[in-house]
Amino acid sequence: MNITKAYVIIFLVVILTNSLSNSNGLASSVIETSKNDVCFVPCTIRYGTFECFHDCILKLYRDGNCVHGRCCCTK
């Protein structure tokens, strides 16, 4: 019985540690540049400048382009 209790405690500590260590992961997914741009999706071969521009227009931004490997939308 004590072994099961120990496993449960270790499992809960691991879950708690993982949830706390990943709390800053979401904040780094959106980057704001000095020109009031919002960069969010990585640009790839399949997701290029045209797709980036299209997504930015759909999100009601004025323009969109791949900058430093990220899709950036201009307000």
Image: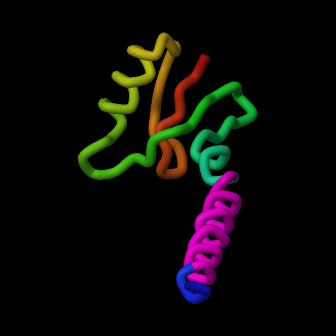
Asked if residue 69 is among those painted magenta in the image, a careful observer would answer no
Q: Residue at x 69, y 25 (%)?
A: 36
Whole-percent x and y of residue 52? 38, 32
Residue placed farthest to the right in the image?
Answer: 34
Q: Quadrant of the C terminus?
A: top right
13 relative position to 1: left or right: right
Whole-percent x and y of residue 35? 70, 28
Q: Is residue 64 above or below residue 69?
A: above
Asked if residue 9 is among those painted magenta in the image, a careful observer would answer yes
Residue nearest the observer in this picture, 70 or 30: 30
Q: Residue at x 63, y 58 (%)?
A: 19
Residue nearest the observer in this picture, 5 or 60: 5
Q: Quadrant of the N terminus?
A: bottom right
Q: Residue at x 57, y 74 (%)?
A: 8
Q: Is residue 19 above or below residue 5?
A: above
Q: Is residue 34 above or below residue 45?
A: above
